[in-house]
Image (spheres, rainbow, N blue to C red):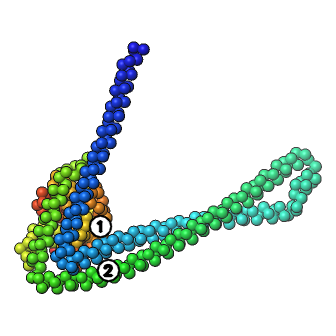
Amino acid sequence: MSRSLPGKLLLSLMLALLVFNTVSMADDKSAKEKQLKTLLRKIDKLKKSIDVKEDNKSSYTKQLKSVERKIGKVNQQISATDKKITAKKSELKALRATRLKHQKKLDQENDYLAEQVYAAFTLGRQERAKLLFSQQNPQALQRNLVYYQYFSNARVALINDVQRNIDKIIATEELIHQAQLELEQNQKSLETQIKGLKVDLGKRKTIISSLNKELKQQGGSLSRLEDEATQLQNLIKSIEEIFVDAPESEISQKAFAELKGKLAWPVKGKLKKLFGRNKPQSELRWQGIVIEAPNGRQVKAVSHGRIAFSDWLRGLGNLVIIDHGNSYLSLYGHNESLYKSAGEWVEAGDVISTIGNSGGQNKSGLYFEIRKKGRPQNPTGWCKAENKFASG
């Protein structure tokens, strides 16, 4: 008994450690969940305060925000419906191929069965009796009876196969019918979504025209540019303050600073605005770059990080900001649709949005910034040199 005591003590110690670790992990998970909820509440509060300030500035800005948010969501719905239609068409194609395969097999089985029925008919109704009384040789009789039983069993099996294939064809036909109905519903839904989008685009055009008229009456674009730059700076400052206590990622990642010159570009397009150059009719300088690309093209995260902001902001429209840790942020503006929400983790290459012209822009394209401690960095120094775009 005394010899087994150390073993029992060791086992008890191991169980105690296991329980302690389990409780500790549960407490750690609970703490992180609380941190995340606090983070999301702060981000939501920040977004609401921005909305209040924006809505007080101009009724047209409020209308533009509303319609561009809606356009982004409708385009997202259209994209999802398109994918459903493509998937349903592939499903229909596969089902029709399955039906054809079963039909060919059924045709073959029908031919075989027809041959056997004909053979049976030529022997007459008393096949087994004829075999019994027409053979004098017992061995030949026994052999013929075996052959007869074999063909009889084969005929029954063939009839069963024919029935199974008929059942498969009927089931496949039902699936095809259901898939066709779903495809028709998706196509009708797509038509409705496109009609709604056209109406919203018409509203957007009218709102932008009214906004530009209001802007001229209030003294031009310079004050607006300065106001938008200040607003963005304030937003970034608030995000940095909020994310100081943000829960860390559970996945070990290379520090963002070590990726300088190695980042993939967020989208393929044409570089139209260069970092550091003056904006038109202004002393303000570009703090990022504009990459022109077609509406709907996917925008991808340049590196691992957490979505800090994903909403509409005056001047930049549908905007995504990713916090990469150690005071590094990447910004993606003028998006059409937003695919990630604040608080979500993303990896390099994850689709975060699609190209658009939100924020009242005439041309579609992506506004892209990288910031360190709130200060703009030249994106061309951070992204891979081999992916340079044509500048203009």
Q: CA distance from mark 1 to mark 2?
A: 17 Å
The answer to which image quadrant residue 217 occupies is bottom left
User: Which label was assigned to residue 126?
Assistant: none
User: Mark 2 belongs to which amino acid?
Assistant: Asp
Visible in this render: residue 271? no
Vertical order, 62 against 248 (above or below): below
Visible in this render: residue 62? yes
Marks 2 and 1: in contact by CB < 8 Å? Answer: no
Q: Quadrant of the C terminus?
A: bottom left
- Residue at the image point whose x is 91% and y is 56% from the top: 130
Query: Callout 1: few (<14), some (14-19), or many (20+) C-alpha neighbours within 10 Å?
Result: many
Left/right of residue 158 with respect to residue 135 in the rendered view: left
Residue 196, how many percent across, how many down?
37, 79
Label 2's element?
helix
- Residue at the image point whose x is 22% and y is 52% from the top: 246
Residue 226, how many percent across, how many down?
10, 73
User: Mark 1 belongs to which amino acid?
Assistant: Leu
Left/right of residue 16 with respect to residue 335 in the rendered view: right
Label 1's element?
strand
Q: Which residue is mark 2?
A: 200
**Which numbered disc flags the more N-terminal residue, 1 or 2?**
2
The answer to which image quadrant residue 206 occupies is bottom left
Q: Nearer the viewer, mark 1 or mark 2?
A: 2
Residue 202, how many percent across, how many down?
30, 83
Vertical order, 134 against 270 (above or below): above
Left/right of residue 101 with respect to residue 313 in the rendered view: right
- Residue at the image point whose x is 58% and y is 64% from the top: 98
Q: Which residue is mark 1?
A: 338
